[in-house]
Image: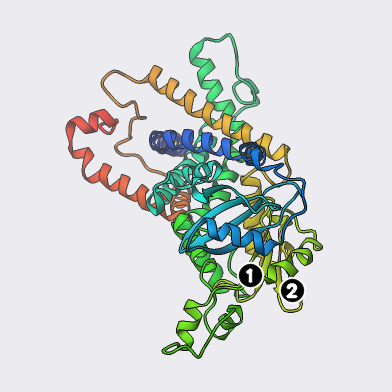
């Protein structure tokens, strides 16, 4: 009998562990499924940004066949169309007959102006945050709710990671059977079909989905903010990171880009200044003087000769950078380069390629490019669509299984074990996961405390949630 009890102990521990993982998988799914459906749908739309944006802006593709006027004249036309604005960036035209895209800003606002390069006619004005793909971007990343939405999406992504990991454990094949693991078994009834559809889809898409979730975390307000802090603390250079953490960080960056540099350098941007005016001091001169954008006429051919990957943005000096700069803003981040320009000599002072960036920036850059389907299109886009459709299938099959199996009058969660003993390794892994994903760890602790200290004492809630086992 002693030998039997000792041999049954590991089996009991495995049973207890399986039940605990099943319950956490159920809780994760209960919270995550609406968010997973939302993220999969909006993410799948954003994957086709390279195809959708030219289609949406096709009326600006061919607007002239006459010679273009000076870039500075085009900039002035855009600034006149948006009173009180400053130049944020001049987008290098990719075709001689296309409208010129000029980004102007005021404070934290960014506005895109489409200008006919020959006639200087303003063809269109649109706020950057009102462009279709930008709306999808913020719907995907923060539900258009700002920092609070970003944290909610991060929380959902963290629970989705837990859901996928626990799902892999629950459905991992423990024998050599391929049916129900690599492909669904047909002809065995609806119960087996939905079970196999859920398990097989999870087996095929989980690794892709985990990568997408992890590569998206640097954009989040909480986890991404902590990563930026660590990066700034230990970075060997003071270069700003090439990613932002939500709309608030975007506005702060744009604010710096729209603000002329302070100090003596600002005086070199003034034209027509009469310092003999009564009461005019240096501070008033910097504030009142118009900005000289004429250097862009000399810099455009210099930047064009560098053959950066489009779109290429040429930006004037600002608080973010004290010199004229140019950068590739392609979605394929490993192909990006940045230039520091000398406006007086019309020369490139410094060129920084992606390979010269800090290691952490390069890792995140590759992750972001894959996340957006830009690293190796169209295969990257196909894999993204496959993963998104797989997640939608997982959510749909999970709801069908739950609805078909749910006993009447209860939630249908796997019943808890009142006196279960869980392996230390399992508890350690949960603690480790909660430490790496702080929002997940805090919310798991809150769920455990509410369940243990409150819901178990409430008879009807305990029965509904399966806690009275």
Q: Is residue 337 left or right of residue 389?
A: right
Observer able to see residue 260: yes
Residue 172 shows up from this direction: no
- The percent coordinates of residue 70 (x first, y second) are 71, 62
Residue 62: image location, x then y, percent: 72, 41
Q: Residue at x 46, y 55 (%)?
A: 247
Kindly state the secondary structure of the residue where label 2 is placed: strand
Q: Nearer the viewer, residue 217 or 175?
A: 217
The quadrant of the rendering that contains the N terminus is top left
Q: Is residue 163 above or below residue 184?
A: below
Q: Which residue is mark 2?
A: 350
- Give the x, y percent position of residue 321: 60, 73
Quarter location, residue 278: bottom left
Q: Where's residue 159, x and y in %? A: 44, 43
Instruction: Give the residue at x 73% y 45%.
Output: 64
SS of the residue at dot 1?
Answer: loop
Is the C-beta separation of discs 2 and 1 under 8 Å? Answer: no
Please report the residue visible at 56 percent of the width from the left and 52 percent of the height from the top.
112
Q: Which mark is residue 293?
A: 1
Residue at point 17% right, 32% down?
459
């Amino acid at each position: 009998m002693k030998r039997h009890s000792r041999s049954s102990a590991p089996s009991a521990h495995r049973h207890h562990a399986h039940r605990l993982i099943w319950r956490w998988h159920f809780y994760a799914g209960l919270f995550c499924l609406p968010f997973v459906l939302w993220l999969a749908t909006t993410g799948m739309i954003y994957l086709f940004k390279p195809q959708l944006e030219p289609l949406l802006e096709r009326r600006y593709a061919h607007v002239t066949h006459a010679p273009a006027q000076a870039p500075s004249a085009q900039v002035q036309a855009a600034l006149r169309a948006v009173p009180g604005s400053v130049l944020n960036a001049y987008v290098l035209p990719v075709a001689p007959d296309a409208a010129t895209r000029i980004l102007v800003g005021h404070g934290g606002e960014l506005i895109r102006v489409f200008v006919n390069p020959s006639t200087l006619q303003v063809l269109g004005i649109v706020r950057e945050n009102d462009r279709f793909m930008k709306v999808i971007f913020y719907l995907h990343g923060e539900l258009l709710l700002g920092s609070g939405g970003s944290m909610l999406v991060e929380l959902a992504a963290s629970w989705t990671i837990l859901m996928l990991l626990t799902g892999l454990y629950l459905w991992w094949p423990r024998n050599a059977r391929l049916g129900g693991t690599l492909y669904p078994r047909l002809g065995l009834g609806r119960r087996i079909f939905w079970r196999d559809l859920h398990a097989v889809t999870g087996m095929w898409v989980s690794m892709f989905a985990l990568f997408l979730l992890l590569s998206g975390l640097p954009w989040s307000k909480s986890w991404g903010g902590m990563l930026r802090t660590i990066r700034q603390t230990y970075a060997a250079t003071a270069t700003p990171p090439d990613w932002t953490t939500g709309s608030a960080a975007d506005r702060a960056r744009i604010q710096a880009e729209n603000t002329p540099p302070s100090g003596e350098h600002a005086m070199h941007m003034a034209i027509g200044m009469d310092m003999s005016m009564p009461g005019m001091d240096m501070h008033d001169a910097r504030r009142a003087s118009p900005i000289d954008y004429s250097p862009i006429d000399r810099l455009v051919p210099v930047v064009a000769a560098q053959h950066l990957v489009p779109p290429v943005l040429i930006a004037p000096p600002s608080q973010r950078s004290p010199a004229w700069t140019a950068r590739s803003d392609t979605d394929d981040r490993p192909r990006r380069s940045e230039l520091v320009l000398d406006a007086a000599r019309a020369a490139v002072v410094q060129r920084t390629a992606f390979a010269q960036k800090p290691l952490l920036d390069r890792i995140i850059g590759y992750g972001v490019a894959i996340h957006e389907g830009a690293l190796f299109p169209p295969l990257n886009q196909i894999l993204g669509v496959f993963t998104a459709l797989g997640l939608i299938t997982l959510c749909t099959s999970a709801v069908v299984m739950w609805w078909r199996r749910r006993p009447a009058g209860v939630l249908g969660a796997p019943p808890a074990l009142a006196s279960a003993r869980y392996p230390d390794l399992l508890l350690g892994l949960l603690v480790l996961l909660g430490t790496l994903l702080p929002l997940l760890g805090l919310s798991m602790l809150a769920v455990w405390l509410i369940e243990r200290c409150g819901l178990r004492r409430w008879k009807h809630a305990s029965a509904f949630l399966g806690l009275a086992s």
